[in-house]
Each structure stands twice: as C-alpha cells, then as structure tokens.
Image: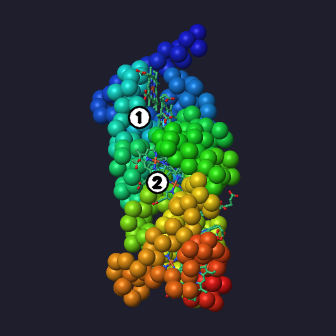
C-alpha cells in the first residue's frame, strides 16, 4: 500500500517535471552522459578507458563541454526523438571542416590551430577522425589512432611504402622509426631552411632545425666551414629522406652526379655569384678515384678545420 502510494507520487512528480522542462526550454539542451548509456551500451562500456573520460570525470570544463555531448553536442532533442542521426552531432553526417572545428573547440592548447588550418591535410579535406578513432582506436589506443601509425599513413600514401623497402632506407616498416619522427600530420610552421618553401609538413626540431638533426646530431654544427647546401637547401637536396636504391639514401646513383648538379659553374649562384665553383684542375675526372668525391671531401656536411671539407 505504502509502496504503491510512493510510486504514484513519483510518477506525478516525474510527469510534472517533464511538462515543466518542455514549457521552459523549447530549444535543444545538454542532458548529461548517463542518459546515453541505456541506448549506446557498447560505446559507453569502453569509455572509462578513453582519455576523454577525464573530461567527464574531472568536471574541469564548462558544463556544455563535458562527456559525450562535448563532441556530439546537446542531446535533448535526440533523446526525445528516441535516437536518429539528424537529432544529434553525428560525425557520419559531418563534412571535414565541421568535424575538425568540433575537435578544435578543445584541442587548440596542444595543437596549433593556425598550422592545422594551413596543413596539406586540412586543405585536402582530411579531418581529425580520418586518422583518430574515438571509439574504436587500434592497438594499445595510443593517441587514439584508427590504425597502427604506418598502416594508417600508407592507407592514403601507398606510394611511400615502397620507398621504405629500398636497399638504403630508414627502418619505418620494421617499426624502428615512425612517420611522425619527421612529420607532423597536424601541419607545421614555415621552416627556416629551404627559403621556407614547401614545408611538406616536415616537423621542426630544436630551434626550427630539420628533424633529421634530432638523431644525426653530428651534422648539426655550427661548423667553422659550412657546406652552404646543407644549411640552406637542407638534407633532402642530396638525400631521399624515406629510402633510395642508391647508397646512403642519395638522390643520385653516384656521388659525383650529386655534386656536379651544383658544382658546374653555371648560373649566377654561389658565393661569388658566378656559378657554384667547380673542382680545380688538379681533379682528374677521368680517374675513377676522383669520381668518388667524398673519399677526399670526407666532411661533406661541414668541417671545423678545412674550407674544402677534406678533414
Ligand atoms: C572526443 C569526441 C567524442 C566523444 C567525447 C564521444 N564521441 Fe561518439 N563519436 C565521435 C566520433 C569522431 C565518431 C565517429 C566514429 C569514430 O571516429 O570513431 C563517434 C561516433 C559515435 C557513435 C556512432 C557509432 C560508432 O561507434 O561509430 C555513437 C553512437 C557515439 N559516438 C556515441 C557516443 C557516446 C554515447 C559518447 C559518450 C559515452 C560519445 N560518443 C563520446 C566522437 C566522440
Ligand atoms: C532512446 C535511445 C537513445 C538514447 C537515450 C540516446 N541515443 Fe543516440 N542513437 C539512438 C539510435 C537508435 C541511434 C541510431 C540512429 C540511426 O542509426 O539511424 C542513435 C544515433 C546516435 C548517434 C549518431 C551515430 C552516427 O551514425 O553517426 C550519435 C552520435 C548518438 N546517437 C549519440 C548519443 C548521445 C551522445 C546520447 C546521450 C546524450 C545518446 N545518443 C542517447 C538512440 C539513443
Ligand atoms: C570537450 C573537449 C574535447 C573535445 C571536443 C575533444 N577532445 Fe580530445 N581530449 C580532450 C581531453 C580533456 C583529453 C585528455 C587530455 C589529457 O589526458 O591530457 C583529450 C585527449 C585526446 C587525445 C589523446 C591524447 C593522448 O595524449 O593520447 C586525442 C587523440 C584526442 N583527444 C583527439 C580528439 C579528436 C579527434 C576530437 C574530435 C573528434 C577530440 N579529441 C575532441 C578534450 C576534448
Ligand atoms: C593525417 C592523420 C592525422 C590527422 C588528420 C590528425 N591527427 Fe592527430 N595525430 C596523428 C598521429 C599519427 C598522432 C600520433 C603522434 C605521435 O605518436 O607522435 C596524433 C596525435 C594527436 C594527439 C596527441 C598529442 C600530440 O600532439 O601528439 C592529439 C590530441 C591529436 N592528435 C588531435 C588531433 C585533432 C584534434 C585533429 C584534427 C584537428 C587531428 N589530431 C588530426 C594523426 C593525425
Ligand atoms: C627520416 C624522416 C622522414 C620519415 C621517417 C618520413 N618522412 Fe616523409 N618526408 C620527409 C621529408 C624531409 C620530406 C620532404 C622531401 C622533399 O621535400 O623533397 C618528406 C616528404 C613526404 C611526402 C610528400 C612528398 C612525397 O614524396 O610524396 C609524403 C606524402 C610523405 N613524406 C609521407 C611519409 C609517410 C607516410 C611516412 C611514414 C610511413 C614518412 N613520410 C616518413 C621525411 C620523412
Ligand atoms: C585519409 C587519407 C590520409 C591519411 C590517413 C594520411 N594522409 Fe597525408 N595526405 C593526404 C592527402 C589527401 C594529402 C594532400 C595531397 C597530397 O599531397 O598527396 C596528404 C599530404 C601529405 C603530405 C604532403 C604534404 C605536402 O605539403 O606536400 C605528407 C608529408 C603527409 N600527407 C603525411 C602523412 C602522414 C605522416 C600520415 C600518417 C600519420 C598521413 N599523411 C595520413 C591524405 C592522407
Ligand atoms: C628518429 C631518428 C632519425 C631521424 C629523425 C632521422 N634519421 Fe637518418 N638514420 C637514423 C638511423 C638509426 C639510421 C641508421 C640506419 C638504420 O639503422 O635504420 C639512419 C640512417 C641515415 C642515413 C644513412 C643510410 C645508409 O644507408 O647508411 C642517411 C643518409 C640519413 N639517415 C639521413 C637522414 C635525413 C636526411 C633525415 C631527415 C629527413 C634523417 N636521416 C632523420 C635515424 C634517424
Ligand atoms: C650536398 C649534399 C648533401 C647534403 C645537403 C647532405 N648530405 Fe648527407 N651525405 C652526402 C653524401 C655524398 C654522403 C655519402 C658520404 C660517403 O658515403 O662517403 C652523405 C652521407 C650521410 C650519412 C651517412 C654517413 C654519415 O656521415 O653518417 C648521413 C647520416 C647523412 N648524410 C645525413 C645527412 C643529414 C642529416 C643532412 C642534413 C643536415 C645531410 N646529410 C645533408 C651528401 C649530403
Ligand atoms: C645543392 C647544391 C650543392 C650540392 C649538391 C653540392 N654542393 Fe658543394 N657547395 C655548394 C655551395 C653553394 C658552396 C659554397 C661555395 C660556392 O658558392 O662556390 C659549396 C661549397 C663546396 C666546397 C668548398 C668550395 C670552396 O669554396 O672552398 C666543396 C669542396 C664542395 N662544395 C664539395 C662538394 C661535393 C664533394 C659535393 C658532392 C658530395 C657537393 N659539394 C655538393 C653547393 C652544393
Ligand atoms: C683525391 C682527392 C679528391 C677527390 C676524389 C676530389 N677532390 Fe675536390 N679537392 C681536393 C683537394 C685536395 C682540394 C683543395 C686543393 C685544390 O683546390 O685542388 C679540392 C678542392 C675542391 C673544390 C674547391 C675548389 C676551389 O675553387 O676552391 C671543389 C668545389 C671540389 N674539390 C669538388 C670536388 C668534386 C665535385 C669532386 C668529385 C667529382 C671532388 N672534388 C673530388 C681533393 C679531391
């Protein structure tokens, strides 16, 4: 008897509250994440392991930005409609720009909005959720990537895979290195090398250097005698950064052809503006010994003791 009365009273209160809400707030509002659990148990179940769970638990964000609704937007209309794709922020219906904007409402602290906007990925309509999967991240879920990193990138850049299988290469396919050791898929600022052109989303290391110098620190300098091309044009003038059929990942099959591309005295480049200097007459180019320039010019990346990089 007692219980029955309670139930009736409860129903009355719920009913009153329901009508009150409808009367007061006709527009879509936030309802909180727990409401989602009943109809989306699969998504909800794993969510406590998601880094975004923190934003629910910690309560350190404005109310409108917590939990499921932080990304999917206010859920009231959706719940009242008992589901539907158009009643809520469904990524399956969003264009790239809208999806990117949604993520950037929070992620401009760790990522630069400016770099993302002008990155080749954003320009080509590649959005955050093409690479990240919030609910079905691969592997150990590091950075919520949709797939293991190399597979993710090869999914759209199939031509790059072959380069990393060439005889001279960086060991990315072997899992020893990653694309993001050199690239920032979120875009980069204009670099200081190569006259700041065509950044190719190549990341910058300390002091805006090429990322290569993080690992190949012996090439960093500064050297008393710099080889201008290393400092100005950058490593990829002579090397293919991914891999190559040629030894030491050089762009050309023999060392001589790498050098003579610039050291041919033509044009108005070089320190004297009369073309980049050619080798002197002492060089007997018919002698195979002279064709392998770096047997003598051993400090080709810069030297502290010899202006012609002999030591
Ligand atoms: C950090 C942003 C974010 C948060 C927080 C988030 N989602 Fe999602 N949700 C997405 C994205 C992006 C997709 C599109 C599919 C994908 O990338 O995994 C998605 C897809 C979905 C889908 C479609 C089914 C599917 O698995 O693809 C449902 C349902 C869903 N989310 C419900 C929820 C619920 C419920 C919560 C809270 C427990 C939640 N989402 C929290 C971003 C988010
Ligand atoms: C009464 C049940 C119910 C509740 C409560 C509910 N949903 Fe849904 N939701 C659905 C149904 C059913 C669909 C499937 C619509 C379809 O596939 O056509 C759906 C679809 C979605 C989608 C679209 C997925 C896509 O295809 O991109 C998202 C996002 C979503 N729900 C998020 C939420 C969030 C966030 C909450 C909590 C605020 C929530 N839902 C509460 C029933 C519900
Ligand atoms: C409501 C704010 C909010 C929104 C919107 C949001 N995030 Fe997050 N995101 C967070 C917070 C908070 C963390 C946890 C950061 C931490 O642990 O330091 C996080 C963590 C992440 C991480 C993991 C970082 C790591 O170190 O592993 C990724 C990846 C990520 N978010 C991607 C996205 C994507 C993609 C979207 C859009 C679909 C998105 N986020 C939308 C707040 C948000
Ligand atoms: C082209 C693929 C790609 C796109 C597009 C992309 N990301 Fe990432 N993101 C990655 C990869 C790969 C990592 C892992 C980096 C690492 O492990 O060093 C990452 C890492 C992150 C992290 C972890 C912190 C960090 O800086 O490493 C966050 C947060 C993140 N991404 C958010 C976003 C958001 C938000 C967007 C959309 C504006 C986005 N990402 C777009 C591939 C992408
Ligand atoms: C050792 C550093 C390094 C690694 C690792 C690396 N890249 Fe690159 N990548 C570069 C540099 C430097 C350039 C610019 C080359 C140029 O401008 O000539 C570049 C250019 C590119 C380009 C544009 C030019 C082209 O060749 O099509 C794509 C796409 C690319 N990389 C994808 C990837 C992918 C995918 C991975 C991982 C599987 C990866 N890179 C790993 C350094 C690297
Ligand atoms: C969803 C498809 C997709 C994925 C996944 C993807 N990319 Fe791209 N990427 C593109 C498109 C489209 C472009 C622009 C067109 C082009 O230059 O090929 C691009 C361009 C690039 C460029 C060339 C930039 C330039 O300025 O020329 C690099 C470097 C690159 N991506 C690296 C990566 C890396 C590293 C990953 C993995 C973390 C990755 N991409 C994942 C689609 C993708
Ligand atoms: C994350 C560390 C790392 C970064 C970043 C890196 N490298 Fe390497 N590089 C290595 C390692 C390690 C080797 C030795 C080969 C191996 O073990 O895979 C190597 C080898 C080389 C070789 C010699 C290849 C051979 O066949 O002997 C060249 C040339 C080279 N790297 C150039 C570059 C250039 C140019 C860049 C920047 C675009 C770069 N590296 C960025 C780690 C790195
Ligand atoms: C002017 C052309 C040129 C430029 C620019 C250049 N290199 Fe090299 N590099 C060479 C040549 C030639 C060799 C082969 C030397 C040999 O085998 O005797 C080489 C060899 C290497 C090697 C393998 C042998 C060693 O010395 O460790 C690495 C690593 C390397 N370069 C890294 C770099 C990095 C990093 C940059 C950018 C800071 C760079 N290179 C810029 C021409 C160049
Ligand atoms: C991208 C163009 C470029 C490439 C490739 C290049 N160099 Fe240079 N090198 C220069 C420039 C510019 C200077 C500065 C001297 C000048 O302006 O004449 C220079 C200077 C030199 C000097 C010092 C000359 C002097 O003025 O004392 C030597 C020696 C040299 N290079 C050898 C080589 C060798 C050997 C190779 C091949 C492994 C090579 N260079 C590849 C552009 C290049
Ligand atoms: C047998 C050793 C040896 C080889 C191999 C060699 N050089 Fe030299 N190179 C020297 C010496 C010694 C000097 C400095 C004395 C001189 O000017 O003859 C020099 C000087 C130079 C200079 C500076 C010229 C100037 O005006 O100051 C250039 C440029 C140069 N070499 C380029 C090359 C190129 C390119 C190759 C490969 C085709 C090459 N060298 C192969 C020994 C060598």
Which one is earlier in the sequence, the residue at label 1 or at label 2? 1
Give the x, y percent position of residue 303.
Answer: 61, 84
Vertical comparison of 95 with 209: above or below: above
- Tell me how the rendering is colored: rainbow
Q: Looking at this rendering, what residue extends furthest in the top direction?
A: 1
Residue 153 visible in image: no
Give the x, y percent position of residue 111.
Answer: 47, 57
Question: Is ligand 1 less than 8 Å from the beta carbon at label 1?
Answer: yes
Tell me which residue sits at (41%, 67%) in the image: 190
Vertical comparison of 238 with 25: above or below: below
Question: Is ligand 4 less than 8 Å from the beta carbon at label 2?
Answer: yes
Q: CA distance from mark 1 to mark 2?
A: 19 Å
Vertical comparison of 159 with 278: above or below: above
**In the foreground, 78 or 289:** 289
Give the x, y percent position of residue 29.
Answer: 37, 36
Residue wearing tag 2: 186
Location of residue 72 by image quarter: top left
**Dot 2 lies on which element?**
loop
Tell me which residue sits at (38%, 26%) in the image: 85
Residue wearing tag 1: 91
**Dot 1 lies on which element?**
helix
Residue 68 visible in image: yes
Tell me which residue sits at (38%, 22%) in the image: 84
**In the foreground, 101 or 262:** 262
**In the foreground, 131 or 277:** 277
Tell me which residue sits at (36%, 85%) in the image: 273
Label 2 Cα neighbours within 10 Å, binned few <14 / some 14-19 / many ≥20: many
Q: Quick one: quadrant of the N terminus? A: top right
């Amino acid at each position: 008897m007692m219980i029955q009365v309670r139930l009736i009273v409860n129903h009355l209160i719920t009913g009153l509250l329901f009508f009150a809400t409808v009367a007061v707030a006709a527009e879509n509002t936030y309802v909180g994440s727990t409401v989602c659990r009943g109809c989306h148990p699969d998504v909800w179940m794993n969510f406590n392991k998601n880094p975004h769970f923190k934003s629910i638990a910690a309560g350190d964000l404005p109310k409108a930005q917590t939990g499921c609704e932080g990304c999917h937007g206010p859920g009231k209309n959706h719940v009242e409609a008992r589901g539907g794709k158009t009643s809520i922020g469904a990524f399956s219906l969003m264009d790239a720009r809208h999806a990117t904007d949604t993520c950037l409402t929070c992620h401009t602290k760790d990522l630069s909005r400016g770099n993302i906007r002008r990155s080749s990925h954003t320009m080509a309509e590649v959005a955050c959720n093409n690479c990240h999967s919030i609910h079905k991240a691969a592997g150990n879920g590091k950075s919520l990537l949709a797939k293991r990193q190399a597979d993710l990138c090869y999914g759209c850049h199939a031509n790059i895979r072959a380069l990393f299988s060439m005889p001279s290469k960086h060991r990315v396919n072997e899992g020893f290195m990653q694309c993001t050791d050199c690239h920032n898929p979120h875009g980069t600022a204009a670099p200081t090398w190569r006259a700041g052109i065509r950044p190719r989303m190549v990341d910058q290391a300390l002091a805006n250097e090429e990322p290569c110098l993080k690992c190949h620190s012996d090439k960093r300098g500064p050297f008393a005698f710099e080889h201008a091309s290393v400092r100005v044009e950058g490593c990829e003038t002579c090397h293919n950064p991914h891999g190559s059929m040629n030894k030491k990942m050089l762009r050309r099959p023999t060392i001589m052809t790498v050098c003579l591309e610039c050291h041919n005295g033509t044009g108005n480049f070089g320190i004297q503006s009369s073309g980049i200097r050619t080798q002197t007459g002492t060089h007997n180019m018919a002698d195979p010994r002279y064709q392998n320039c770096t047997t003598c010019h051993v400090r080709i990346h810069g030297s502290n003791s010899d202006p012609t990089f002999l030591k």
